Image: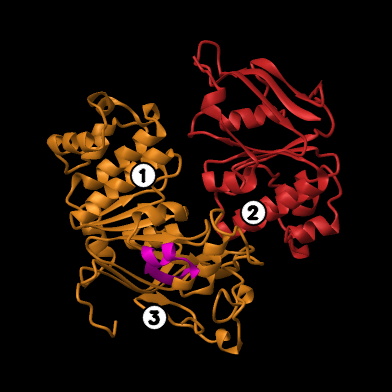
Chain colours: A red, B orange
Amino acid sequence: MQLEAKKISFRYQKNSPWILKDVDLTVQAGERVALLGPSGYGKSTLAKILAGYENPVKGEVFWDGAPLPKKGFCPVQMIGQHPEKAVNPRWKMARIVNEGWQADEQTLRELGIEKAWMNRWPSELSGGELQRFCIARALGPKTKFLICDEISTMLDVITQAQIWQKVLAAAQKGGLGLLVVTHNKALAARVCERIIELPKLNRPS
Amino acid sequence: MEEKQEKMALLDVQKLRVSFDMYERGLQKKELEVLHELSLRVYPGEILAVAGASGSGKSILAHAVMGILPGNARTEGEIRYRGELLDRKRQESIRGKEIAFIPQSVEYLDPLMRVDRQVMGIRGAKEKQETAFARYHLGKEVERMYPFQLSGGMARRVLISTAVMEEARLIVADEPTPGLNAEMAMETLQNFRELADEGCGVLLITHDIDLAFQAADRIAVFYAGTIVEIASVADFLAGKEALRHPYSKAFIDALPQNDFKPIEGFQPYAGNLPKGCLFAPRCPMRSGECEKEIAMRKIRDGEVRCVHAT
């Protein structure tokens, strides 16, 4: 199984410059790949396209040979940079974390999610705590591929290491493919087996 | 304050406490202390980096120094600038002149004003603005632009230009580098280095410890609203044996270029702090003494807030 992006091109409007142009990328299940590149080069846009949050202007994304499903649980899940923007502020945490699957005790415990937090609103938790919920939410049994877009940039290095140990353990256990968007080269080298520089894949006009 | 300093500190913050009045439910008022007995000094010619997690109160420190905390904030303790008390009146009269602030967000620029006008401000001269722009590689065409026309890096350099318009002696920079690529971030830090070498003091607030390693002279480690250790960058680069506080040591272990090994637990909430040492619940060296008030003390040319530190 593999996640395959074929000739992905993206721009916001007709006549505006291409952000992504003919990007090809293949990542195998079980593989851990880092995507590096300067800010403003379209890393997050590519991540969103690969996870089905954004449609490319041209090109297609395939998981296991088929286009990403438009309905139901997407096997390619994304965790973003701003957890506070990825949760419904009017839902309590228990509802948020169980939206895609019934998160089991062990996952919650390993991510350091305390029982008392389940009854809180998102605004009552810090960014690092919310991010743990976003990770737990994405680690359901139907998830086959995980896209991590700067998931630890806003965290201190200890929380960063905590969170990555859990993500790596889950990826190992479930044989997940991992695409890690980051600007931190040391982190990329630590977490991933293969490093891709987006400017080398991308040929915007 | 007991020890005599060879050099007078430019900025001397002693036992600063900041709390916010918050309404919990209806009219029930609650006081939430977010900075706890924080002390630090910035000397002329040095860059002191304040590093720590987001949400640990670093920006509040900057805002307290500048006197721009919101109305529901209360401060205790002392802030001195060049030996004299920096009260509200003095803050208002010297900020923007002797003390320059580089805010965290480029959204602090006025979106409806061309950038040359904003950089000149109400006192600045055109020539000075031109010199500042030349210094930070901002072309002539940038002068007439509005903020939305600037790239992130250009906007950062515009903000830095405003800080050098007057002859500031103290620069307070709040997260000046996010959104810049590595080269641009290094260049920004190089600019601070130059200003420090010219005799300015720089208080550099950042959550990027790697940048702090590269630019600063000393680093203050922030945890849960206070400073747990202040040490020279050399100590941080030498590794955890050279550091004093167990949190700073854990910090070094957790870096991806080192062991990438985390410790358990979380930074406590402002509203739900442990007694005594704020780090004690996660600390391997915890003992009964840790529940007492812990004061900052000097060890090996650094300062630490831990009874066990050696």
Asked whether residue A191 appears in the rendered view, the answer is yes
- Looking at the picture, tell me which residue is in the foreground, A88 or A9: A9
Callout 2: SS: helix
- Disc 3 to disc 2, C-alpha distance: 40 Å
Residue labelled with disc 2: A123
Chain of the residue on which disc 2 is drawn: A
Question: Which SS class for mark 1?
Answer: helix
Circle 1: is it few (<14), some (14-19), or many (20+) Cα within 10 Å? some
The image's mark for residue B299 is 3
Which numbered circle lies on residue B186?
A: 1
A68 in relation to A92, above or below: above
Q: Label 1 amino acid? A: Met
Q: Is residue A59 left or right of residue A198?
A: right
In front here: A62 or B25?
A62
Question: Type of residue at label 3?
Answer: Ile
Q: Point out the stretch of residues depicted in magenta.
A: B225-240
Residue at x 23% of width, y 50% of height: B194
Residues marked 3 and 1 touching at CB (< 8 Å): no
Residue lying farthest top?
A: A15
Was residue B230 drawn as part of the magenta stretch in this picture? yes
Measured as percent of width and height from the top left, residue A160 is found at: 60, 54
Quarter that holds the N terminus of chain A = top right
Please report, as a chain letter, where disc 1 is located.
Answer: B
